[in-house]
Image: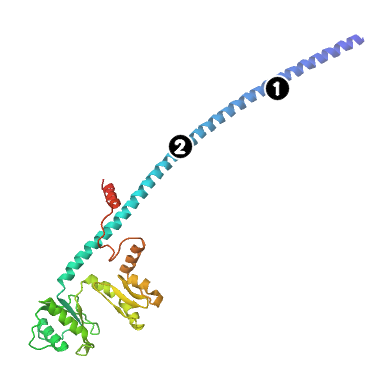
Amino acid sequence: MKQGKRNKKEETNIGTSEKDSTVSADMAAEILTEMRAMRQEVAGKLEKIDASVKEVKEVVKNLENRMDESERRIGASEERGDRTERLLAYMLTKQRQLGEKCEDLESRSRRSNIRIYGVKEGAEGEMTMTEFTDNLLKSLLELPADRDLGIERAHRSLITAPTDPKASPRSIVVKFLHFPTKQQILFKAWSKKGLKYQGNIISLDNDYSLDIQRRRKEYRDIKRQLKERHIKFRSPYPAMLKVSLESGEKTFHSAWEAADGLKHLGITVSLSESELIEKELSQLGWLTQGQARGRHPSRAVLSDMRALTT
């Protein structure tokens, strides 16, 4: 009886073990299947990552190549810009030299001219301007009536006649046949003080070119302030200012130089646009007014010119 129960129990245990073995095998198979699927999924993702990494590497490589090319181009542009700036400075200097030559030629053509300032418009009346000027100069300078001044021609400056009666009258340009006569008239006028005609103050000066007139006018405020401070100065040709200071005589070739050099005296000036440009160019190291005479292009500049034209 006991033997029969034992046999039944063993059979039951054997059945249970076989059942457990079957379940374990199924679970292992399922786990293996899931692991293979996971492995395939991971492998697929790794492939995508590899592909993405390759793409990133290609992009980085392209960027590096573009950066190298950009640096090369920037370096070449900077070098070319430096050469261009040097050449521009030289061309500006050359243009200034040519301008000064033209100005000198124009000034030489005016050497026998003077300008008379302060004569009212229409003061000549029925006389020609030549006759009127001859009589005016003899009267103002107390010259003999029979003296031949050798005036070739005379006329008002060619600007538009003022319509406002309070406006300054146009100057009178007088051309003499002989330069010495012109100089005598001018020096005699400068030696006399307080020349007047019809109640107006009359002054005589050289007939400067328009550019020289402009540059000399730039000193107007500076001269006024120097006079107020009782400081002696003079204005040599073409457009310089020589100031007598305690440390000695100082020469300026432009209004901006004078404005900077006389700051310690309390002189303040509002510079024109042309003077500000001249100052800026000088601060950049470019040759400006009066600095370019006698300068020739250096070998470096000539080399740059050849490089830019090839």
As drawn, 51 above or below 196: above
Quick check: 133 left or right of 220? left
Q: Residue furthest right?
A: 1
**Could you give the CA–CA distance between mark 2 and mark 1, rounded to whole angstroms?**
50 Å
The quarter holding residue 65 reads top left
Q: Locate residue 186, reporting x and y percent.
A: 18, 81
| Residue type of the residue flagged with mark 2 | Lys
- Crowding at label 2, few (<14), some or many (≥20) Cα neighbours within 10 Å? few
The quarter holding residue 297 reads bottom left
As drawn, 213 above or below 99: below
Q: Secondary structure at mark 1?
A: helix
Asked whether the viewer can see residue 183, the reply is yes
Q: Which residue is mark 2?
A: 61
Point 18% across, 70% down: residue: 107
Point 45% across, 40% down: residue: 64
Say how the picture is coloured.
Answer: rainbow
Q: Locate residue 260, reporting x and y percent.
A: 37, 71
Asked whether the viewer can see residue 202, the reply is no
Could you say which is closer to the camera, residue 187 or residue 287? 187
Q: Which residue is mark 1?
A: 27
Q: Nearer the viewer, mark 2 or mark 1?
A: 2
Where does the N terminus fall, quadrant-wise? top right
Point 82% across, 15% down: residue: 13
* Chain-order first, disc 2 or disc 1: 1
Q: Locate residue 230, reporting x and y percent.
A: 34, 83
Point 28% across, 47% down: residue: 307
Q: Locate residue 6, reporting x and y percent.
A: 88, 12
